[in-house]
Image (cartoon, rainbow, N blue to C red):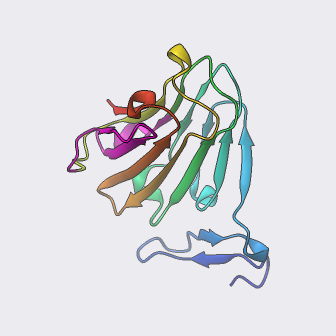
Amino acid sequence: VDSDDNRVKLIPAGTGTTEIILQEASGASSYETLTAARVLTAADSGKTFALALAGGFTVTLPALSTVSGFNVTFVVEIAPTGDYVITAATADLDKMAGQVYGADGATSGTNSIMTFSADLLTFIAAGGASNIGDQATFLQVGTTGWAGQAFVNLGATSAVFSG
């Protein structure tokens, strides 16, 4: 626990002094509402982001080489009329894998064996596919890539890993 701000932090091996926030002060996870494109940094680890602009936008995960143990959750707060896109940094394209679980009981994803070959996850707006409460979580898997999983209110095609 950092004595300056009461956050639980970790300094991963080989990163020098780069701190990863594992838990916010008072035991509560940090929750932030996004209404525009954003590039995340190591300081965003452990946060939950509300996606809250109907027109949609893109959020870029930090470069894999800069963070170890990074994890983040996204929740659709406003149903989109334009897609919400969660993407890997340019240097990390083809290093994302994941599965989408739909309320219809179906699953979809890059492939079911989690091969790291995708660039992004899209919460699809077309036809009202993505809804309030849809969510996705990403975890950095060393320097291999990003492992993601998404849970959606409708069919599993409401969100898709691609790239």
Q: Quadrant of residue 28?
A: bottom right
- Total numbered labels: 0
Quadrant holding the C terminus: top left
Q: Residue at x 77, y 79 (%)?
A: 6
Quadrant holding the N terminus: bottom right
Farthest residue toward the top? 127
Q: Residue at x 55, y 55 (%)?
A: 72
Asked whether 93 falls inside the magenta stretch, the response is yes
Asked whether 96 falls inside the magenta stretch, the response is yes
Relative to 137, 29 lies left or right: right
Q: Position of residue 88 (x, y in %)?
A: 43, 41
Q: Quadrant of residue 104?
A: top left
Q: Which residues are magenta?
A: 86-113
Q: State whether residue 39 appears in this view.
A: yes
Q: Residue at x 60, y 26 (%)?
A: 57
Q: Is residue 57 above or below residue 92?
A: above
Relative to 97, 50 lies left or right: right
Q: State whether residue 40 appears in this view.
A: no
Q: Position of residue 80 (x, y in %)?
A: 62, 23
Q: Residue at x 54, y 23 (%)?
A: 83
